[in-house]
Amino acid sequence: MKLQFRLNVISVFVRDFCFMDDLAVARALHVISVVAWIGGVYLVTFVVLPSVRAMDEALDQIRSFDDIESRFGGHAKIMTLIAAGSGFYMLYKMDAWNRYASLDYWWIHAMTAIWVLFTVVLFVLEPLFLHAWFDKRAQEAPAETFAMVARFHQILLVASLITVFGAVLGVHG
Ligand code: HEM
């Protein structure tokens, strides 16, 4: 009985796997990458930054934040690549490039703008100078620097969540 059940589960899985259409797979990958990436930003904004800011020593604050951000940075880079790969693939498959010409699809513009912003920060600004600049400034004026970083994360997070809201309504609403 158990074996029969397992075989049924496996056959359903194999059937679904064989008949998956590539657009649906791209959409699923897109949603996974967005969940991991924006979920990480949510955690940094509402959990990591407040707890780091509550530490007494500036050096502890900087070390902890650097450590957490650099660990998350690797994940964020991979997720931004998957989000863009799957997103542009969907536009190509649906032949929907003309959405960039219509304000009705503001959420497509918003998704692309958020992706460009994160990509520039993660792949260009951070390795070039942002990291070193942050460490230096945080040692000189920790409270102000962390307040600025918190504000930056809050703005990005709100923009990202509004975009997710608009995209889901735009696709399914
Ligand atoms: C280069 C960047 C991106 C491109 C080209 C892109 C493209 C797309 C496309 C073509 C769709 C499917 C639209 C449809 O089915 O009519 C989509 C869905 C979606 N995207 Fe993006 N996207 C990008 C980045 C983002 C980002 C940064 C976010 C989050 C802030 C995001 C969140 C979503 C969500 C939530 C959906 C709806 C999924 C669903 O419910 O089916 N995307 N995106």
Image: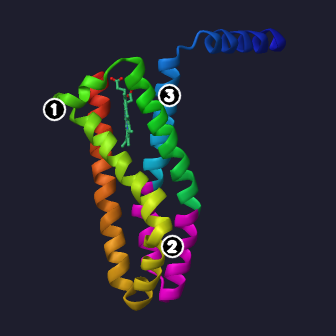
What residue is rendered at 53% in x and 72% in y? 66
What residue is rendered at 45% in x and 72% in y? 129
Which x, y percent locates residue 13?
67, 15
* Magenta-colored stretch includes residue 61: yes
> Residue 16, located in which quarter of the rendered image?
top right
| For the residues bearing labels 3 and 1, Cβ distance under 8 angstroms | no
Which dot marks residue 65?
Answer: 2
Which x, y percent locates residue 19?
59, 9
Read off the residue under disc 3. 28
Relative placement, left or right, of 167 versus 124 is left
Q: Earlier in the sequence, mark 3 or mark 2?
A: 3
- What span is colored magenta in the figure? 41-70
Which dot marks residue 167?
Answer: none
Which amino acid, mark 3?
Ala
Read off the residue under disc 1. 103
What residue is rendered at 53% in x and 14% in y? 21
Under circle 1, the secondary element is: helix
Q: Residues within 10 Å of mark 2 (few under 14, many from 20)?
A: some
Near-viewer residue (129 or 111): 129
* Magenta-colored stretch includes residue 42: yes
Q: How many marks?
A: 3
Q: Earlier in the sequence, mark 3 or mark 1?
A: 3
Q: Does the beta carbon of the residue at mark 3 sit less than 8 Å from ligand 1?
A: no
